[in-house]
C-alpha cells in the first residue's frame, strides 16, 4: 500500500518525490493553480496553490508530499486569499474578457469564476503593453501576461529556443521576447512550439483563427475548472 | 425645416448650458430651450453626450477581435455592430462570398435581432405613450401599467422579444454579445434541434407581429390629426435596398430619396459611402451631423430607420408585410410621410417582415448546413453596412500587414437621425411650449418625439421610460426660468427662480 496524506480530510496517495499538487491532481483533488503545469518543474510564482499544513502555509506545487500530513486547501480563509491574488493579477494586466478570444478557454478567468470573484476590487493599473504582431502566425498580447513563465520554461526546456524571458524586477517584471529587436518575428518560434501552446491565458494567439470555438463548446463552458481532473490537458486539445 | 431654432440670434445674451458629464450615448440626453422675454422659443437643441471611443481603442488590436469588441457599443442591438464589423472584415480576409449556410445563419441572427429590438421598443417603451396618451397618469405610463391594463398586449411584447433573443442565442451562442459571426463566416452551425425549437413558435410569432401592425394602425385611425402632424420634419431619407429594390436589412446598395420621394441616388455601392455622406461637426454637440454631399449641409440631412426603409424600398419580399406596406403607402396618399409617429407603424411592419423571414430561413435546409467559413486574398480595408433596427449602420476599417487595425470609422444609426430628431423636438416645442410653463406632460411630448426614432441614446428610451433627461427654460437674459429633470431612477426634480 502506498503512502498517503489527507487534503481536507480526504486520503490522497502519493509516490516518493511527488509534490502535494501533483499527488492531489493525480487523485482528482483540485487545488487552484495557474503557474503549475504537470509537464514542467515546480515554479511557485502564482501562489494560488497555497495550502495550510500543520498551521503553516506553503505552496503545494513546491512542497513535497509526506506521509500523514494533514493539508487544508478548500477553506474559506485560503480561498479568500486566492481570490485576492487573482484580483491582483487582473488589475496588474489588462484583462478585458468580453473581447478576448481566450474567454471560456482561459485558466485565469475560469479560476476567478471558480473562486467567486465578482469584481477586480483593486484599482486597475492599466499598464501600456503594445501587442507584438510581427510574427506571421503568432500574435503576442502582453496585456494578459500573468508572469507564470510557462512560455519561458517551455521555450527553454522543451523547444530548446530560449525565446522568452522575464525582465525587470518586482512590480515592473514583464515578459520579453529574447531577440535583439525584441520582436517575435526575429525569433525562430513556430506555431508548433510548446511555448506557443502552453499559455494558460491569452498572451499567445494563433493568427489563423479567432473566435473559432462557439460559445457553449469552450473548455470552461462545459464545466468549471475545479471539475476538471486535468484542465491543462483539456486546454491543450483546443 | 426649422433651422432657425437651432441657434438663437443673440446667443451671447443667453446663458450657455454646459454639458459637464461624459458618458455613453445610451441613457443620457439633454434638451435645452432658450426663450425670449415673451416666452417665444428661440433655440431648441437635443444634446447627446456621446462618448464612444471605440474608433480609437480598437486601433492596434487584431482584426478578428473587432466583431466581438465593437458590439459592446450597445446592449440592445449588439448584433448590428457584430454583423457590420464581420461584413467589413469578410473583405479583409478575402471572403467575397460567404457559404450559403453562413450567409443564412447571419441573416437569421440579424432578423432575430430586428424582431427583438422592435418588439422591445414598441411594447416596452413606446406603447405606454400611445395607448394611454402623452399626458396620461405618469404612474401607469410604463410597461407595468400596460401589463395591468392590457395584459395580453404586454405578454405578447415580452414573448416576441424573447423569441428574437432565442434566435440570437441559437445563432450567436448568447442572447446578448455572442460570437457567432467571424470574418469569413460563422463559428456555429444551427443544429436540427435548435431549428425545431424555433419552428415550434414561429407561426405564433408571425401572427402576433401581424396583430401588432393592426394595433398601431388602429391608433393612427383613432387620432389621425395627432399622428399625422406631431413633430413632422420633412427631409431626405436613406437606406439600403436589395438588388431588386426590396427591403433588406442585411445587405444591398444605398438609395436616397428627397422629401417628396424622388430618387436622389440609387444603386450606390456602400463601399463608396464616403463619396456620398459627410459629417458636419457642430460646436454644441458631441454627435456629428451627417449629410448627403451633393445637397450640402443645410439641405442634405436625412432620416434613416423604419420610416425611411419602408418608404424607400419598392416592395417587401414577404407577403404579409408587403400587404401592410401597401396599406401604409396608401394611407399616406402615395407621398412619403414625415410624421415621426409613423415610425411606429413602419417599425411594426418591419417586425412582421422579420418574423416572416425567420420562418422562411428556418424552413431552408441550408440553415443546418456545416460549411461555415470562406477565405481568400487578403485585403487591407473593409467596409460593412447593415440596416440596424434604428437605421443604416456603417463600419469601416483598415488593417495593416500584421493584422492590426489602423483605422476605424463608425457611423451609427442614431447619428444619421441627429438633425431629424432635433428638428422634430423643435417642431414639438414650437407647438406645445409657447408661453406655457413646463410640466411633466410637456417633457414627455419632447420625449415622445425623440422616442419615435428609437435612438440609441437609447437606454434612454430603453430604460422603461426613465431616461435621464433635463429640460431647461432660459430667458433672454440667460436666467434659468424653469427646469425639469428626470433622473435615472425615474424620479423628477424641478427648479425655478
Image (cartoon, helix red, strand yellow):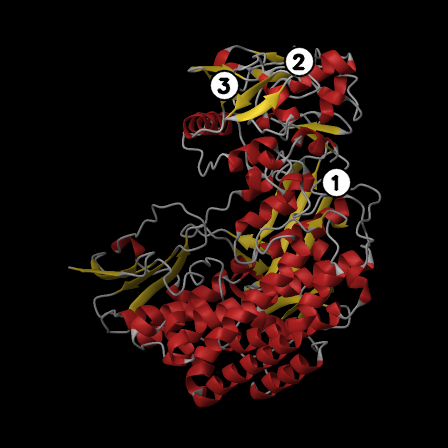
- Camera-side residue of B237 and A183: A183
Q: Chain of mark 1?
A: B
Give the label on residue B139, or none: none
Label 1 and label 2: CA atoms lie apart by: 44 Å
Secondary structure state at the residue bearing disc 2: loop
Q: Residues within 10 Å of mark 3 (few under 14, many from 20)?
A: some
Report the residue at 78% width, 43% height from top: B93
In this view, B13 is above or below B198: above
Label 3 and label 2 in one chain:
yes
* Mark 3 vs mark 2: in front: 3
| Residue B440 at least partly seen | yes
Secondary structure state at the residue bearing disc 3: strand
x and y, in percent, of residue B243 in the image: 77, 68
x and y, in percent, of residue A141 in the image: 63, 28
Report the residue at 59% width, 47% height from top: B70
Secondary structure state at the residue bearing disc 1: loop
Give the label on residue A70, or none: 3
Residue at the far front in the pictured view: A1
Label 3 and label 2: CA atoms lie apart by: 24 Å
Residue hosting label 2: A41
In this view, A220 is above or below B313: above
Q: Residues within 10 Å of mark 2 (few under 14, many from 20)?
A: few
* Mark 1 vs mark 2: in front: 2
- Camera-side residue of A210 and B171: B171
Of pointers 3 and 2, the one earlier in the residue sequence: 2
| Residue B303 at least partly seen | no
Residue at the far left in the pictured view: B497
Q: Quadrant of the C terminus of chain B?
A: bottom left
- Camera-side residue of B340 and A218: A218
Residue hosting label 1: B380
Amino acid at each position: 500500500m502506498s503512502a498517503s496524506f489527507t487534503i481536507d480530510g480526504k486520503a490522497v496517495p502519493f509516490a516518493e518525490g511527488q509534490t502535494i499538487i501533483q499527488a492531489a491532481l493525480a487523485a482528482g483533488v483540485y487545488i487552484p493553480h495557474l503557474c503549475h503545469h504537470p509537464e514542467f518543474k515546480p515554479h511557485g510564482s502564482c501562489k494560488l496553490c497555497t495550502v495550510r499544513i500543520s498551521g503553516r502555509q506553503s505552496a503545494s506545487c513546491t512542497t513535497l508530499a509526506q506521509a500523514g500530513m494533514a493539508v487544508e486547501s478548500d477553506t474559506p480563509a485560503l480561498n479568500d486569499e486566492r481570490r485576492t491574488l487573482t484580483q491582483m493579477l487582473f488589475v496588474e494586466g489588462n484583462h478585458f474578457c468580453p473581447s478576448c478570444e481566450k474567454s471560456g478557454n482561459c485558466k485565469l478567468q475560469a479560476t476567478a469564476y471558480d473562486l467567486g470573484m465578482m469584481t477586480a476590487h483593486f484599482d486597475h493599473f492599466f499598464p501600456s503593453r503594445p501587442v507584438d504582431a510581427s510574427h506571421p502566425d503568432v500574435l503576442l498580447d502582453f496585456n494578459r501576461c500573468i508572469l507564470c513563465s510557462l512560455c519561458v520554461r517551455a521555450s527553454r526546456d522543451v523547444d530548446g529556443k530560449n525565446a522568452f524571458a522575464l525582465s525587470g524586477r518586482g512590480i515592473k517584471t514583464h515578459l520579453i521576447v529574447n531577440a535583439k529587436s525584441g520582436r517575435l518575428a526575429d525569433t525562430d518560434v513556430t506555431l508548433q512550439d510548446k511555448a506557443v501552446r502552453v499559455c494558460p491565458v491569452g498572451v499567445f494567439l494563433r493568427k489563423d483563427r479567432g473566435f473559432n470555438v462557439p460559445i457553449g463548446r469552450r473548455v470552461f463552458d462545459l464545466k468549471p475548472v475545479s471539475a476538471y481532473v486535468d484542465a491543462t490537458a483539456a486546454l491543450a486539445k483546443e | 425645416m426649422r433651422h432657425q431654432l437651432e441657434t438663437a440670434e443673440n446667443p451671447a445674451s443667453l446663458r450657455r448650458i454646459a454639458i459637464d458629464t461624459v458618458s455613453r450615448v445610451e441613457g443620457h440626453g439633454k434638451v435645452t430651450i432658450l426663450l425670449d422675454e415673451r416666452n417665444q422659443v428661440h433655440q431648441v437643441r437635443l444634446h447627446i453626450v456621446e462618448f464612444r471611443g471605440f474608433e480609437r481603442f480598437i486601433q492596434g488590436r487584431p482584426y478578428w477581435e473587432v466583431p466581438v469588441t465593437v458590439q459592446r457599443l450597445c446592449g440592445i442591438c449588439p448584433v448590428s455592430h457584430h454583423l457590420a464589423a464581420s461584413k467589413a472584415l469578410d473583405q479583409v480576409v478575402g471572403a467575397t462570398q460567404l457559404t450559403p449556410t453562413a450567409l443564412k445563419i447571419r441573416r437569421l441572427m440579424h432578423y432575430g435581432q430586428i424582431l427583438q429590438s422592435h418588439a422591445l421598443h414598441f411594447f416596452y417603451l413606446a406603447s405606454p405613450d400611445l395607448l394611454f396618451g402623452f399626458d396620461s397618469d405618469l404612474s401607469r405610463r410604463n410597461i407595468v401599467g400596460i401589463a395591468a391594463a392590457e395584459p395580453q398586449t404586454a405578454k405578447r411584447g415580452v414573448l416576441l422579444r424573447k423569441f428574437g433573443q432565442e434566435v440570437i442565442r441559437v445563432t450567436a451562442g448568447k442572447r446578448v454579445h455572442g460570437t457567432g459571426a467571424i470574418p469569413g463566416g460563422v463559428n456555429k452551425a444551427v443544429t436540427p434541434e435548435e431549428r425545431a425549437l424555433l419552428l415550434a413558435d414561429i407561426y405564433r410569432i408571425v401572427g402576433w407581429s401581424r396583430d401588432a401592425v393592426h394595433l398601431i394602425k388602429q391608433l393612427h385611425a383613432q387620432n389621425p390629426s395627432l399622428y399625422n402632424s406631431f413633430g413632422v420634419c420633412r427631409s431626405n431619407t436613406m437606406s439600403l435596398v436589395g438588388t431588386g429594390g426590396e427591403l433588406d436589412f442585411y445587405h444591398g446598395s444605398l438609395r436616397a430619396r428627397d422629401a417628396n420621394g424622388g430618387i436622389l441616388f440609387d444603386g450606390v455601392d456602400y463601399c463608396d459611402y464616403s463619396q456620398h455622406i459627410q459629417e458636419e461637426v457642430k460646436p454644441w454637440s458631441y454627435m456629428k451631423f451627417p449629410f448627403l454631399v451633393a445637397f450640402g449641409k443645410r439641405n442634405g440631412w436625412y432620416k434613416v430607420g423604419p420610416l425611411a426603409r419602408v418608404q424607400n424600398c419598392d416592395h417587401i419580399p414577404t407577403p404579409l408585410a408587403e400587404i401592410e406596406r401597401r396599406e401604409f403607402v396608401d394611407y399616406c396618399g402615395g407621398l412619403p410621410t414625415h410624421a415621426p409617429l409613423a415610425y411606429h407603424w413602419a417599425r411594426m411592419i418591419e417586425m412582421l417582415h422579420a418574423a416572416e423571414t425567420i420562418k422562411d430561413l428556418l424552413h431552408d435546409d441550408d440553415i443546418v448546413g456545416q460549411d461555415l467559413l470562406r477565405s481568400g486574398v487578403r485585403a487591407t480595408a473593409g467596409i460593412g453596412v447593415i440596416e440596424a433596427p434604428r437605421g443604416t449602420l456603417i463600419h469601416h476599417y483598415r488593417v495593416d500587414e500584421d493584422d492590426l487595425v489602423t483605422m476605424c470609422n463608425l457611423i451609427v444609426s442614431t447619428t444619421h437621425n441627429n438633425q431629424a430628431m432635433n428638428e422634430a423636438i423643435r417642431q414639438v416645442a414650437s407647438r406645445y411650449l409657447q408661453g406655457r410653463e413646463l410640466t411633466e406632460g410637456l417633457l414627455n411630448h419632447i420625449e415622445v418625439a425623440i422616442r419615435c426614432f428609437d435612438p440609441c441614446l437609447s437606454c434612454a428610451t430603453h430604460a422603461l421610460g426613465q431616461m435621464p433627461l433635463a429640460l431647461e427654460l432660459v430667458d433672454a437674459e440667460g436666467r434659468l426660468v424653469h427646469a425639469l429633470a428626470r433622473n435615472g431612477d425615474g424620479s423628477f426634480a424641478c427648479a425655478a427662480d
